[in-house]
Amino acid sequence: MHVKLHVWRQAGPTTPGTMETYDAPGISEEMSFLEMLDVVNERLNADGQEPIAFEHDCREGICGSCGMMINGQAHGPQRGTATCQLHMRKFQDGAEIFIEPWRAAAFPVLKDLIVDRSAFDRIVESGGYITAPTGAAPDANLTLIPKEVADAAMDAAACIGCGACVAACPNSAGQLFTAAKINHLNLLPQGQAERYTRVQKMVDTMEEFFGSCTNHGECQEACPKDISIDFIAYMNRDYVKAQLKNRKLLSQD
């Protein structure tokens, strides 16, 4: 197949960027989207041109580093799929494909399609630790966890931190990512000791970088792991409770 690419090129974070056009003939429909970009970069290298910079690592939909906007959609046209899992058979022969980096103030462009997502790291770091007993290991069945609770915690833990939720949100809100990281701990018994201090610290840190959630729901539509916005409601509930509980703890000190 033969496609035409319109790719955002930007030499660095302080330089202006522009869309550049590249013809890409001889592309197999069985290639992944990143493999197609690999082929284009090999041709650019052969012609002495600067290759397109993009992030990738596992190429199995696990690491979350491959995110980009494809024809205005986070990760492209296939729902529940990271960019590395998207295949060229999802596009028509002769298609024009527009490729851009995430567009959010919290994700400044570093080069071409690569953005700085360290704001996510700041949120996770603010969550602190989990208290764990240091004595003998308890029996595996000692702490009973209802299946629905375990399933919900695992659904939240599926978040790969790609940033598609932020890129798709008209407010560039980070609530879905933050809610997933909070709830995969807050739903389990092991996460209860720091539950309310954790949610307050993580939400407060999130608000330093990202916009406010107004329930557009675009985040869950763009999420490659189909994480539900229900987790945002759980996070908001715990945050409200934390205001009272943490105030009581401070007054007792």
Image: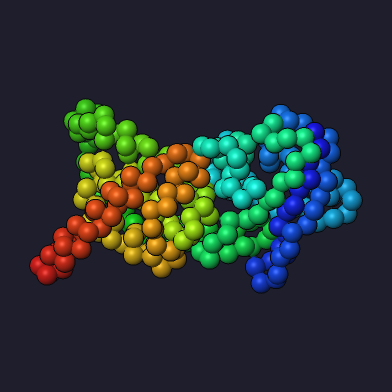
Horizontally, residue 96 falls left or right of residue 57, namely right
Q: Quadrant of the C terminus?
A: bottom left
- Residue drawn at the location 28% of the way across and 48% of the way down: 234
Q: Quadrant of the N terminus?
A: top right
Total numbered labels: 0
Instruction: Measuring from the top left, give residue 51's x and y in whole percent.
Output: 78, 53
Horizontally, residue 192 falls left or right of residue 103, namely left
- Residue drawn at the location 58% of the way across and 37% of the way down: 78
| Residue 96 visible to the viewer | yes
| Residue 124 visible to the viewer | no
- Residue drawn at the location 12% of the way across and 70% of the way down: 251
Instruction: Measuring from the top left, give residue 27's x and y in whole percent.
Output: 79, 35
| In the image, farthest residue toward the bottom | 14
| In the image, farthest residue toward the right | 47
- Residue drawn at the location 22% of the way across and 48% of the way down: 192
Q: 21 above or below 148? A: below
**Which residue is at the front of the view, 140 or 28?**
28
Display coloring: rainbow
**Which residue is at the front of the view, 88 or 217?**
217
Instruction: Measuring from the top left, give residue 198's x and y in whole percent.
Output: 28, 56
Q: 10 above or below 94? A: below
